[in-house]
Image (tube, rainbow, N blue to C red):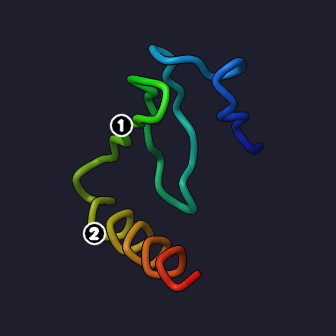
Amino acid sequence: MPIDLDPAAFPPGTATRTLFHKAEIVLWRTDEDVFVLEAWRTFLPYVEGLLADAALELSAR
């Protein structure tokens, strides 16, 4: 299920556990435009790869 990241629905200080593709993560909003993503150490290479791919895709736009 998608998470509504609008500040009204997910304000700073809010955290949730969810799936990021196949990795279980904790997503925490620490400020209006700042998020912390935590994952188990065993998932880190996978999550880092997903984030790197997303960054490349966004930079190509």
Give the Cα separation between the discs numbered 2 and 1: 17 Å
- State the residue position of label 1: 36
The residue under the point 43% across, 29% down is 28
Considering the numbered disc 2 on the image, is that residue within a helix, a strand or a loop? helix
Q: Is residue 42 above or below residue 39?
A: below
* 41, 60: nearer the viewer: 60
* 49, 19: nearer the viewer: 49
- State the residue position of label 2: 45
Q: Residues within 10 Å of mark 2 (few under 14, many from 20)?
A: few
The residue under the point 57% across, 40% down is 18
x and y percentages locating residue 12 in the rendered image: 49, 17
User: Which amino acid type is marked by label 2?
Assistant: Pro
Q: Quadrant of the C terminus?
A: bottom right
Residue most toward the right?
Answer: 1
x and y percentages locating residue 33 in the rendered image: 46, 35
Q: Is residue 50 above or below residue 32?
A: below
Considering the numbered disc 1 on the image, is that residue within a helix, a strand or a loop? strand
Q: Is residue 9 above or below residue 20?
A: above
User: Which amino acid type is marked by label 1?
Assistant: Val
* 38, 4: nearer the viewer: 4
The residue under the point 53% across, 80% down is 57
- The quadrant holding residue 31 is top left
